Image (cartoon, grey):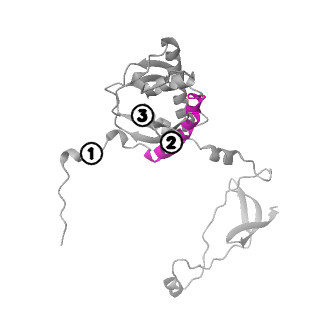
Amino acid sequence: MNTMHAPTPPGAIRALDPCRLGQPTQLLDPLTERLRSRLDVQLPQHVRHRHAMAWRVAAMSVSASAPSVTDVIVQRFQVDGHGIDVAIDAGLLRDAFRLRYDADDFVGPPALHAAPPAATYERFVTRFARQMLDALRQAVSAEMSPTTACVETLQSAPRSTPPSLWIGARIADRAGDAPLGTVTFRLAAEDARRWLTMLGPDAGERVAEHTPPACDVATIPVRLSAHWLDVDLSLGALLDAQPGDVLPVRFMQRALVCVDNDPLMSADIVERDAHLCLTHFQTLE
């Protein structure tokens, strides 16, 4: 018996997003994982409190569509002529402000919190957003210079934006997993592509790159050129050959070692551990 499936309603079909075409999307997972670890380092710096409350990143998300948010504060940074928006839930910022300064009146949902002092709060918001941006910068590459960016505060998330990439981090209480708010980064599609292609090695890879060799001996780059030699092989043996069979090959009595196609030395060709090696070098007269 054949099972028939109803066609997908037109409204449920998601069109392919043109701004994702040609993007190095395979780098999104490494980027979000690094960003998550960097944010987990940055967040506790803002929520020090005598009750030892701590925050963490509960989940990461990536989308080509703008998130549905209302009460957010957006800081727009200009980095090397490119705009990057850092949108933070207003309630999350108010909570962070009170936890940072150990306010005793921290109680109730964010909507019930009294407005903090304007000047101090504005400086705190800018510093908070800038450090979130620095976390993104460090996730891309530790080689990038620290952010020296112009910043502009937007009253709400812009309704119309060019094709963009949104990277969201949902923040939760480390103790009870209670959701607290979201930090969202918006990069224009071209800027996202540029940042992704700048994705450098992580800390473990950097340590491996900078680990000195066990023996500090100067090395000479050598390029080996292989040439086919005439070998007698019967047609029957060739027809009977199977993948993986070894064909008999004769080597020259002495190989020539050349520099810029000029013969410099001769050497014997030997097989060692399934590798061809040169040995017994002699300088040509």
The C terminus: image quadrant = bottom right
Disc sitting over residue 190 in the figure: 3
Disc sitting over residue 31 in the figure: 2
Task: Answer yes or no: is residue 81 visible.
Answer: no
Q: CA distance from mark 1 to mark 3?
A: 22 Å
Q: Give the left or right position of residue 45, taking residue 182 as reference.
A: right
Q: Earlier in the sequence, mark 2 or mark 3?
A: 2
Which residue is more in the foreground, 154 or 160?
Answer: 154
The N terminus: image quadrant = bottom left
**The magenta stretch spans which residues?**
25-52
Q: Secondary structure at mark 3?
A: helix
Q: Residues within 10 Å of mark 3 (few under 14, many from 20)?
A: some
Q: CA distance from mark 2 to mark 3?
A: 16 Å
Q: Earlier in the sequence, mark 1 or mark 2?
A: 1
Q: Residue at x 50, y 24 (%)?
A: 106
Provide the residue designation for mark 1: 14
Question: Is 233 part of what is drawn in magenta?
Answer: no
Q: Give the left or right position of residue 10, taking residue 113 as reference.
A: left
Q: Residues within 10 Å of mark 2 (few under 14, many from 20)?
A: many
Q: CA distance from mark 1 to mark 2?
A: 25 Å
- The amino acid at mark 3 is Glu
Q: Earlier in the sequence, mark 1 or mark 3?
A: 1
- The amino acid at mark 2 is Leu
Query: Relative to residue 164, is residue 276 depicted above or below?
Result: below
Query: Relative to residue 6, is residue 49 depicted above or below?
Result: above
Q: Residue at x 62, y 67 (%)?
A: 227
Which residue is more in the foreground, 121 or 168?
Answer: 121
